[in-house]
Image: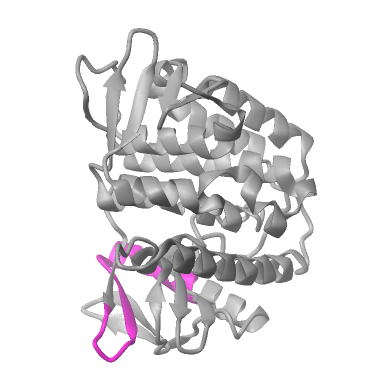
Amino acid sequence: MTSSHSVDILDSGFVFKTANTAEFNEKLKTEVQQIQALHGIYPKLMVPVLHTGLVGGRHFYILEKKSGASLASLVFDATKSIEYKNQIIKHALDSIKTAVKIECSQPIESTYQLHQKIRYEWDSLKQLHSLFDKPVIIEGKIIIPSGRAVVERALAYAEEEIFLASSTSAHCNFHFGNVLYDETLNEISFIDPDGSVQGIDPYFGFSRFAFSFWHELAAEIRDSINIVPLEKSVLFLMKHDQHRQMLDQIPVIRSIHEISNWIGEENYRKFYALTTYCFLRSMRINGSKDTWMMPSSPRAGTPEETLYAGLMFYLESLSSTVQ
């Protein structure tokens, strides 16, 4: 998929975002409007736009200078302790909870048909349906339901629950790369909201955060998981001890049940459906269009296989059995 923009973090600390071609100018203009709207409702959390304009016929904007680093760089920093990573992840979730609460308090006059969106993503992944039907073992855990059963459950929850239709006043993109942490001030701030999912329930922002670990493995780090064919199932194994340790010792990225302190038990089904949609959508965007075939020998997992392992482990690992 062609990227719509480039992002440069200058030595001075300013973030400079530019449309790659003029055809993406409107996208960046809309993003500027969304940032301005979000800064209007939570100014202490949203990094504001400092300047916007055209360069070489391409739209750009510059964000206000902000100290700190992204959670992506901190969470995947091998020199940082697990205790430190747990601490900043919880701090980030506290701030996301504040932001989503404010977003949900904005005037919303309609509901969002998530069932249709999940169905679209599922139908777009027909080439992977045989993988969804295959029994899965992830890091020694036999995942009880099939991937197809997970999607069917998400579809059922999407029919039962009420999803708000957000306006531009919802960020919806709190993945690790868009959450900044200033260690000196102990402050969290946000950049880069997502207009491509405009209208989706604000709780989708939590889903983006929850799937960040697996998205980084699939789309940024790559070659992070091995897939091993077994007689009747597929085995997924982490390639790096650092990632295995993070999955074992950071509860919030390990299981959907660990995030209840921030989303509330009453929103579990809503969050399950939104998170399933988040993973499926990313599999479509980042994955291959080739029909999935069981490998004949162990190999590195593809981005879509890595995301699939994440979907199953995050949503269903607590209902699994240990091999």
User: In the image, is 269 to the left or to the right of 80?
Assistant: right
164 versus 255 height, above or below? below
Please tell me in which quadrant of the rendered image residue 16 appears. Answer: bottom left
Q: Nearer the viewer, residue 85 or 286?
A: 85
Instruction: Identify which residue is drawn at 45% across, 16% down.
Output: 135
Q: Nearer the viewer, residue 17 or 242?
A: 242
Instruction: Identify which residue is drawn at 71% across, 34% down.
Output: 157
Q: Nearer the viewer, residue 245 or 190?
A: 245
- Judge whether residue 35 can be spotted in this image: yes
**x, y percentage for residue 56?**
21, 79
Q: Nearer the viewer, residue 261 or 153?
A: 261
In magenta, the rendered stretch is: 9-32
User: Does the magenta segment cover residue 87?
Assistant: no
138 versus 199 height, above or below? above
Please tell me in which quadrant of the rendered image residue 256 appears. Answer: top right
203 versus 105 height, above or below? above
- Judge whether residue 291 can be spotted in this image: no
The residue lying furthest to the top in this view is 231
Instruction: Identify which residue is drawn at 42% across, 88% down.
Output: 64
**x, y percentage for residue 177?**
40, 65
